[in-house]
Amino acid sequence: MAQLLSDIARALGGELRGADTLIERLSPVESAKAGSLAFVSHIKFAKHIGNTEASALLVGPSLAELASQKGPCIVVPDAYVSFAKLTQYWRAVHAAPAKPFIHPTAVIEPTASIGADATIGPMAYIGSGARVGSGVRLGSHVVIESGASVGEASVLHARVTLGENCIVGSRCILHSGVVIGADGFGFAQQDGRWIKIEQLGAVRIGNDVELGANTCVDRGALDDTVIDDGVKLDNLVQIGHNVHIGAHTAMAGCAGVAGSAIIGKHCTVGGGAVVLGHLSLADNVHISAASVVTRSICVPGHYSGVFPIDDNASWEKNAATLKQLHALRDRIKKLENS
Amino acid sequence: MAQLLSDIARALGGELRGADTLIERLSPVESAKAGSLAFVSHIKFAKHIGNTEASALLVGPSLAELASQKGPCIVVPDAYVSFAKLTQYWRAVHAAPAKPFIHPTAVIEPTASIGADATIGPMAYIGSGARVGSGVRLGSHVVIESGASVGEASVLHARVTLGENCIVGSRCILHSGVVIGADGFGFAQQDGRWIKIEQLGAVRIGNDVELGANTCVDRGALDDTVIDDGVKLDNLVQIGHNVHIGAHTAMAGCAGVAGSAIIGKHCTVGGGAVVLGHLSLADNVHISAASVVTRSICVPGHYSGVFPIDDNASWEKNAATLKQLHALRDRIKKLENS
Amino acid sequence: MAQLLSDIARALGGELRGADTLIERLSPVESAKAGSLAFVSHIKFAKHIGNTEASALLVGPSLAELASQKGPCIVVPDAYVSFAKLTQYWRAVHAAPAKPFIHPTAVIEPTASIGADATIGPMAYIGSGARVGSGVRLGSHVVIESGASVGEASVLHARVTLGENCIVGSRCILHSGVVIGADGFGFAQQDGRWIKIEQLGAVRIGNDVELGANTCVDRGALDDTVIDDGVKLDNLVQIGHNVHIGAHTAMAGCAGVAGSAIIGKHCTVGGGAVVLGHLSLADNVHISAASVVTRSICVPGHYSGVFPIDDNASWEKNAATLKQLHALRDRIKKLENS
C-alpha cells in the first residue's frame, strides 16, 4: 500500500524537492522511521528535522530550505492544511471501497425513504416517514426516528440516535453514541413539584457538521435547536434546547451550552467550558478550556476564567484567603486613607 | 390541527378575554406570528406584548390588562405553570395515539413479565425475570437486564440500559443513552494496583423521575443508589454509587455527584457543578452552575464558587497574583501593624 | 445463600475470632443488621463498632481488640483490601455460573474469530476480521468493528462500541455506552473553515483496565492512543487522541484529558478535572477534583485549583474583587513603598 512521494506531492499540489521515494506510512516527526512521511508545520518543531528518521517531510515555505537539506520533501503554502488533506488522501487510497448495502437485519419502516447508494448497517432502525439521503452510511444499531432526515453523504456511526423530526444536513459525521433530539430540560415549578414542559421543537443541523462520541443536542421547547454549517463538536458535549451555534464554531470535549444561548460564528470553546443559558457570544469569541461564561460577550477576543492549579498546600492557603478578599480590599482602602 | 382558543382556555382552567380565534401553533412571544399563541410569564418580557404578531397571549393577572388591550388572551394564576400544561395539552391533541405493540424483532426472555398495553420497540432486549409494567413504552434497542423492573407508564427512549436488578418507578422518562446500574467506581489499593470492589447493590429510582440523554446512575457497592420521586436530571449527569437524591431535586447538564453523597429534597444543582463524595446537602440548597461542593452544606440557600471570566490578558494577571494571595494578606497585616 | 463466617475467614486468609456464625449479606457498618458481615477499615469509623447490629466484623489489627469484644470478627492485615476481596468472593459464590452462549440474534461476520467459551449477547455485532478472545463476555448490542480485538476473559457490557482496529486487552471491564475509537478531534483551519484531519491511528488498551459507562477514548491521529495495564476510568470520562495513560492510574467521573497529554503511572485525577493537551504528568501525581491542569507537572504530589464555594452573596463580592486583584497588589506595593 506504499505510495510514491511524487504522487502525494501531485495530489497535494505541492512542490517535490529531492529524490522520489516510497512512502509506507504517515508519522509524527518525532516517531517517524524509514518509510515515513512526516510533517512539520511550525517553526518550534524545526529542531526535529535534523534528527528525524523520516524518509520525507511535508513543510511550508519557511522550513523548505532546512528540510530539503535533510532529504526529500514536499513544500506547500500551509503545511498543516496540507497535512489534513494528506490524511484524507491517505485514507481514500487505503480504505477498501465500501460497496453500499442494506443489512438484512436492519428494520426499515415501509414509509421511510432510503436514497441511492445508502448503506444501512446491521440492526439499524429507520422509523416511519424518515428520509435517508443518497450515499449516507449508517452504522450498526443506528436509530433514525420517525420523520427525521439525514442529508446526502452523511455518516452516522454505530449507535447514533436521531430523534423524531430532527434534521441532519449533508456530509455530516456523527460519532457513536450521539443523541440528537432528546427533550430539552424544561419544567415549571408548582407546589415544589416540577411540571414538564413538553419539548415541541426539533433539532436542525446544517452541512459539514461533525459531532463527537456521546455528544447530546436537545430538541427545542417551541422553536428548534440549530447548529449551523461547518460546526465541529468534540465528545461528550452538551447542547441545551433552543441553542443556536453559528457556522464554523468548534467546541472541545465536555463543553456545555445551556438552553437558549446564542453562539456566534467562528467561535471556539475549550474543553469543559460552560456557557450559561440565554447568553450571547459574538462571532470570533474564544473561550479557554474549563472557563465559565456567566455574561454575554459582545466583543471578539479571548476570554478565560480558571483557578490556577498549585500544589495542594499552597492552593489551600490561597483559597482560604480568597474568601476574605473583599474584606482585604477594604483593609487596603483603609490603609490608603490613613 | 388548529385549536380554538376557547377550548385551550377551558383545558387550562383559564379566563378567555377577547374574541375566540384559531390557534395553529405555540410560539415564543418574540418570534410569534399570526396563528400563534404565545405566553408571557414575567414582567420583564412585557415589552414584547406591544409588538408581538401572536394571535393570542397566555398571561398571569399582572399582565392581563396589557395583554387584553393588545388582543385575545387567556388569563391564569401562574402563566409559566399554565404554559407547561399547555405544552402537554398540545402534545396530547397532536400526537397520533400510539397503539401498543411488541415489535417482532424484540428479544424477550421467557421469564420476563410484560404488562398490559406495553410497547416494546424494535430490537429491544428484556432479560430473565425482568418486569415491565403496564403502559410502559420502550424505544428501539432498549436493554432491560435480568431482574430489573420498570413501573407503569414509564417511557424509556431508544438505547437506554437498565442494569440487573435495578428498579425504575412509574411515569418516569429516561432519554436515549441513559445507563442505570453500571458498576460504581470502587477499588482498594494494594501494592500500587487497584483491587475491584464488586458492586453488589442496585439502583432504585422513584416515580415521576426524568433522566436526560447519556446520563449515568451507578449501582451501589453494598446498599443501593437511590433517586427519590420527582427528581429531574439533565443530560450527561453522573451519579456515583450509593448517592441518595431527595425528592423533587433537579440537576442541569454535566453535573456530577460523587459516591455516597446525600442530596436533600427540592435542591437544584447547576450545569457542570460537582458534589464531592460522602458530603450532605440539606433540603432547599441551590448550587450555581460549575461550582464545586467541597464540604457539606447544612443551611438552605444559594451557594457559588466560580472563577469570574475576563479577557484573557486580565485573567492571566489576576490568576498569577492569586497564587500570592496568602502572602499579600500577610503584607497587608504587616502594613496594618506598622 | 448464607455463608459460614469461618468459610469467609478461610477464603480471605484472615483470623476468625469468636464464635462461627451464618452470614446472610455484606453491609456497611452503619446500616448492618443481624446476619450482616460489616467491615471497619479506618479508625475514624471505630465509633460504629459499639452500636452496630452486624453479626460479625472484618477489621485490621488495630481494631481487632475492640471488634472482638463486640462479637465475632475476622482480623486481616488490611481490612479495605480484604473487603474488596470479600465482595469478589461474595459475587463468585452467589452469581449463577453463566454458561457461555452465542445468542442467535447476534450478527457475526464470517471472517471474525470467536474464542472458546465466549458469550455473545443478543443483537451484538462482530465485524470482519475482529477477534474475540476465549472466555470473553459481550453484552447485548455490543458492536465490535472490523479488525478490532478483545483479549481473553474481558467483559463488554451492553452497548459498548469498539471501533475499527482498536485493541482491548485481557480481563478488562467496559461498561455500557463506552465508545472506543471514535475519531480524535483534529482539524486544520483554512479560510475560516475546518479541514478534517483523518484519524488514522487506533486505540490500544492494556490488561485489567476498567472503563465506566459512556466513557470515550478517541483513536489517534497517526499513532495510537494508549491506555496501559490496570488503568481505571470512571463514567463519562473523555480521553482525547494520542493520549497515553500510564499503568494503574485512576480517574473519577467526568474527568477529561485533551489530545496528546501524557499521564504517568499511579496517578489519580479527581472527578471533573481537566488536563489540557500536550502536557505531561509525572508518575504519582494526584489532581484534585474539578482542578484544571494548565502546565506539565514534573514533581509527584497533590495539586489543586478550585474556587472555594461560598454563600452566593459572599462569592459575588469576592469574585468581583478578584478581577481587581492585580491592581490591589500594586496598591499594596505602593503602600509598602510610601
Image: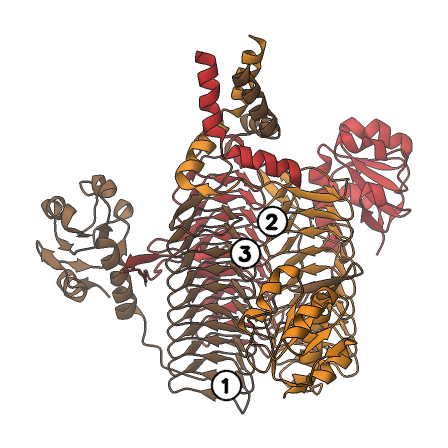
Chain colours: A orange, B red, C brown
Image quarter for residue B62?
top right
CA–CA distance in space, label 3 to label 1 = 30 Å
Which of C6 and A267 lies nearest the eye of the viewer?
A: A267
Residue B41's place in the image compared with C227, above or below, is above
Q: Amino acid at mark 3?
A: Thr
Q: Nearer the viewer, mark 3 or mark 1?
A: 3
| Extreme-front residue of the structure | A69
Query: Which percent across, then down, holds residue C75?
Result: 14, 54
Residue ID for mark 1:
C104
Residue ID for mark 2:
A289
Query: Label 1 lies in what chain?
Result: C
In the image, what residue occupies the spot 76% across and 69% down? A149
Q: Amino acid at mark 2?
A: Ala
SS label for mark 2 = loop
Residue ID for mark 3:
B215
CA–CA distance in space, label 1 to label 2 = 47 Å
Query: Which percent across, then down, holds residue B150?
Result: 50, 61
| Extreme-top residue of the structure | A338
Marker disc for residue B14: none
Q: Are marks 3 and 1 on the same chain?
A: no
Instruction: For the N terminus of chain C, give its image quadrant.
Output: bottom left
